[in-house]
Amino acid sequence: MRDVAILGVGMLPFGRRDEDTLMDMLAYASMKALDDAGLGNGSVDAVYVANMGGGMLQHQTSIASSLVDRLSLLPAAAETIENGPASGASAVKNGMLAIASGYYDTVLVAGGEKMREVTGWRATDFVATMTHPQAEYPYGITLPGMAGMFTRLYMEKHGVTREHLLAISLKNQEMGTRNPYAHVEMALDREGIYDSPHAVVNNPVAADPLHLYDLCPVSDGAAAVVLCTVEQAKQRAKPYVVIAGFGQATDTHTLAEREDPTDLKAVTLAAQKAFAMAKLKPSDVSVAELHDAFTILEIAESEHVGFFKKGEGGKAAAAGKTRLGGQIPINLSGGLKARGHPVGATGVAQVVDIVWQLRHELPENRQVKNATVGLTVNFGGFGNNVLAFVLKRVEA
Amino acid sequence: MSDIPITAYKCKKCGKIHYPFHDRCLKCRAREFETLHPAGQAKLLTFTQIFNLPWGFDERFLIIGIGEFENGVKAMGQIQADDIAGLKLGMKLKPTWAPIRRVYDENVYGLKFVPGA
């Protein structure tokens, strides 16, 4: 297999983007990535588009075919990839493999989702269609509900407390205020959401034991990357980022069928595969973007990828070890919790944020000094399809 | 025949119990199963109370949990309770087959657990 580099990245600010269609967002993010790659007027061999809900929410299908036309990238190959909230990383993986195989040299990967143009209960129902259609969905279970059941067990078995969850909310929303691409640019006050009588109103229970500020927002947004051969990246004569490793694994569709529902086997396996391919270990990672659709997931994933032992992730977060300047900074973008979670875009956005970190392009209040290795984890369903990437900076 | 018309599947080779259906056993990949239905009371494995409901529900909240029946079948169901104050992991639940939602003005039936059986 050939090594694969990331030549260009682009992202639109996430949030509520009433003025843009899904195709507008995909096109704008793609143009930014093409410009960043130095391909403003150039071409690519193939386009992979990550999108989960275009068919359901926008009544639009064949989105990749539409994007190549919109961007005048014809006759590039084009495919839309739907893999739930892991669609973004799946599209990056497919682009990477296409180049690694030697079949293509340059690939554009774009991920986008427009979720805010439907009502909250429609958006909740759309996301819930990932659950099992007979054994789960009819009961009214939602993804926050799945996370609530998982959290109750994780608290019981691994000693996670509301204080630990709170540490994630506070950290990630603070980082959101430093990220111009974040959906939620509002710092939280501990007293306002936890310690005072007003917290009951400000931060109500959403899916017990999870509260409102344990959940990511429903967002519109898009992100894109241009992948290429290492030889192409070297021609730019400046530091670049390679996909040093990737891993993907699956788990049972229903939570009930897992021997230990608190064991996120797919996260562990995906990370192990990614580290093995990169010939690196968790302690080599400078910065990580983990899939914190719910605060509990940042804690659980930080343990399952090997940053902390089981039962230590919550304590580490509360002790500041996952903040900027800490032992392993996690979600300095604000994560899904603050950057937002337009489901098809998230896995691509995680890669974009890590590329910015590894190119040392972020402002001081978000940049990990001398970052060389980054990890992303994109979590589909409720952990039934997970992808991890290890990205590495290469000096020119 | 159980009062709960859920069909679970026991692998004829290794004995692993599945619900819902899989074409091959999740443990040994054998393809032959005998069917069984949830039997006896259920033990509450985990639960949540959700307030942001999906399209199709008019309730203010739902309480949903996973129960493990005495014959090893594990399944999700709604829990009939006014709040979660009385719920505890490991407690006994009485399974019933009752309306869980309405679609086109018709009741849809499913598993509904009653606490404190």
Image (tube, coloured by chain):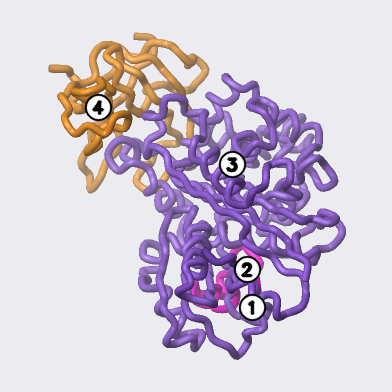
Chain colours: A purple, B orange
Asked if both marks, 2 and 3, belong to the same chain, the answer given is yes
Residues tagged 4 and 1 counted as in contact (Cβ below 8 A) = no
Task: Give the residues in magenta.
Answer: A8-29
Q: Decide: few, some or many residues near mark 2? Use Cα within 10 Å; few <14, some 14-19, many ≥20.
A: many
Q: Observer-nearest residue: B37 or A39?
A: A39
Asked if both marks, 3 and 1, belong to the same chain, the answer given is yes
- Viewer-side label of 4, 1: 1
Query: Which residue is tagged 2?
Result: A5
Q: Earlier in the sequence, mark 2 or mark 1?
A: 2
- Viewer-side label of 3, 4: 3
Image position of A66 (left or right of A394): left
Could you say which disc has been placed on residue B98 in the image?
Answer: 4
Q: Which x, y percent locates residue A33?
A: 63, 75
Q: Earlier in the sequence, mark 3 or mark 1?
A: 1
Residue type at mark 2: give it. Ala
Tag 3, which secondary structure? loop
Query: Which residue is tagged 3?
Result: A294
Residue type at mark 1: give it. Gln
Residues tagged 2 and 1 counted as in contact (Cβ below 8 A) = yes
Q: Earlier in the sequence, mark 2 or mark 3?
A: 2
- From the viewer's perspective, is residue A200 above or below residue B71? below
- From the viewer's perspective, is residue A80 above or below residue A77? above
Label 3, label 4: how far apart the Cα atoms are: 31 Å
Instruction: Pinpoint the chain carrying mark 1.
Output: A
Could you say which disc has been placed on residue A75 in the image?
Answer: none
Instruction: Pinpoint the chain carrying mark 3.
Output: A
Query: Which residue is tagged 1?
Result: A232
